[in-house]
Amino acid sequence: MSGGVSQSLVSARGLVKQYGDLVAVDLIDFDVEPGEAFGFLGPNGAGKSTTMRMIGCVSPASAGSLHIFGMDAATDGRLIRARLGVVPQLDTLDIELSVMENLVLYGRYFDIPRAECRRRAAELLEFVQLSERADSVVDHLSGGMKRRLSITRSLINRPDLLLLDEPTTGLDPQARHVLWDRLYRLKHDGVTLIITTHYMDEAEQLCDRLVVMDGGRIVATGSPRSLIEQHSTKEVLELRFTPGGDGEFTPDMSGIGDRVEVLPDRTLVYADDGEAALAAVHGRGAEPISSLVRRSSLEDVFLHLTGRTLVD
Amino acid sequence: MTTPGPVRVAFWHATVFRRFWVSNVLASVIQPSLYLLGLGVGVGALVDGTARSSEVLGGSTYVAYMSPGLMVTTAMAVASTESLWPVMGGFIWTRSYFGISATPLGPGDIVGGHALWMAARCAVASAAVAVILVLVPEARAWGLVPAVLVSALTGVAFAMPLMAYSTQRRNDAAFAAMQRFAIIPLFLFGGAFYPISQLPRWTQLVVEVLPLWHGVELARSFTVGHFDVSTGLLHIAVLCLWILSGTVLARRFVRRRLYV
């Protein structure tokens, strides 16, 4: 940051995106440093995807400034896009073409010579374990394979920055873990990642640093660990009382732990010592039908900051 | 050496087409062949013997007269079909255009690529019709060669405004109506199978504004041989005007749809 010249790969200041009366992104600032995995965490409609589209230079900002690789997103879109890899929320694959055809054609959009496209495609398919499907028509692949192909395709131009918009939404747990593993390796190889997600575990697994978004604004920034330390207690006691109780059967627990959050299906007691909190609850004569002590997660951070759970 | 963006996009179209080319090419050969047999033989026998035939058809046989019409209407059919559903598919079904928009390519490349692809696709379809026509002695003419180019140009003159139209639509509900109430009537009344002087004046005016008649007249002037430079240039100018305005609109609409 010397001499006022930012070394950040992405730098946003006062970024706004408005659609008519709807403010999708409301004055946000953030920086993404080379080599890090940066996350946007938030519920649907928080403005994550809109922000991603602005970084991807396919959505002009309504106000504020956005610089990527030191270039202005408003004027140098083509040059920036040439160095980006984009995995959109919805696949944009040519489903009637083969895996290899998809990769070669996409490489050609970047004007990479055909032979080079084929060479890179073979290498990348190896990396995502799709080599034996190179000649399969995309329509016949499973959801997880299509997602992996989307990631493969986004890497064909050897991007300096990879944008992943909800990369694992809709995938089964096994497919998610395969994908996370590949992303983790990419990060290890020095590729900068920007990921949006509404899964806390995904953010905790992949992101070095993240921002929590809600209603178009950034409500917190930091590493997953520091966010938990700042905004939550060490442990959480989860209690369930009579089912469907809407909290009406929840006994008075004021004074137990740091904070108590009553959700429709459970009650959360934030305390540094969960077992002690549970003992205190029992001491009041309350009889939960189940109890669980766990470590705080990003979900708790989000709940604390916004009063809502991430995935409804 | 960089490959121009529109060429890269056109190549994508060609790759997708390669999967279905047999059925597509057959369709654009069989249909004109049927019309050639049905109308050429049937109506031709009826028309060629009459006293007014040389006055109305300018001295040529009916088969020779309708041949360029067959070719150019084939290009129109190909261009209109390929500029309705596939364009919508690129935005809604496969979302391929969104994939392209994330690369260094932009709206101009997408629209230019469509124009190039349509020119190639219509030229191939028109050439296939020309091959059929060469087999028929009355229709055989060197003028079929420039007619193929005119036919392709006419196809693009339909493709670009229709691409602009399809880009604006949110679903394909109106597409069948577009074909039934615009393209097919033009096929019937656009001067392909009889001179538009047979039509009421207001119908003639509508037909003279749209691209088909200009393409057919120009192609016909090559095959039955009364090409006139100033009339020819006028036809070309009208076709180019349709291409240009369609391209400008399509480009604006594509930008609005992809880069929001």
Image: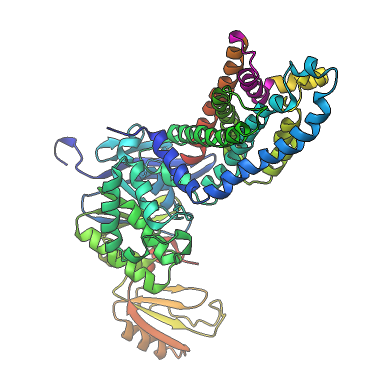
Residue B12 x %, y %: 43, 43
Say if A43 sits above or below A113 in the image. Answer: below
Name the residue at 62% across, 21% down.
Answer: B223
The count of marks equals 0
In the depicted structure, whether residue B258 falls above or below residue B72: below
Q: Which residue lies furthest to the top in this view?
A: B230
Image coordinates for residue B199, horizontal then vertical, percent: 81, 21
Dominant secondary structure (helix, strand or loop) of the stretch shown in magenta: helix
Q: Horizontal placement of B65 versus A82: left or right? A: right
Judging depth in this view, the residue of A247 and A75 nearest the camera is: A75
Against A184, residue A100 (above or below) is above
Q: Is residue A69 left or right of residue B95?
A: left
Above or below, comparing residue A19 to residue A86 in the picture: above
Residue A135 visible in the shown view? yes
Where residue B245 appears, x then y in whole percent? 56, 24
Residue sitting at the far front: B137
Q: Position of residue A232 (x, y in %)?
A: 32, 68
Quarter assignment of residue A238: bottom left
Choose top left, top right, bottom left or bottom right for residue B176. top right
Q: Does the magenta stretch include residue A295?
A: no
Residue A73 visible in this rendered orientation of the protein = no
Q: What stretch is highlighted in magenta?
A: B209-230
Q: Quadrant of the N terminus of chain A?
A: top left
Q: Residue at x 56, y 31 (%)?
A: B160
- Identified at 74% across, 26% down, the residue is B62
Is B223 part of what is drawn in magenta? Answer: yes
Give the residue at x 65% y 21%.
Answer: B220
- Which is more toward the observer, A198 or B84? B84
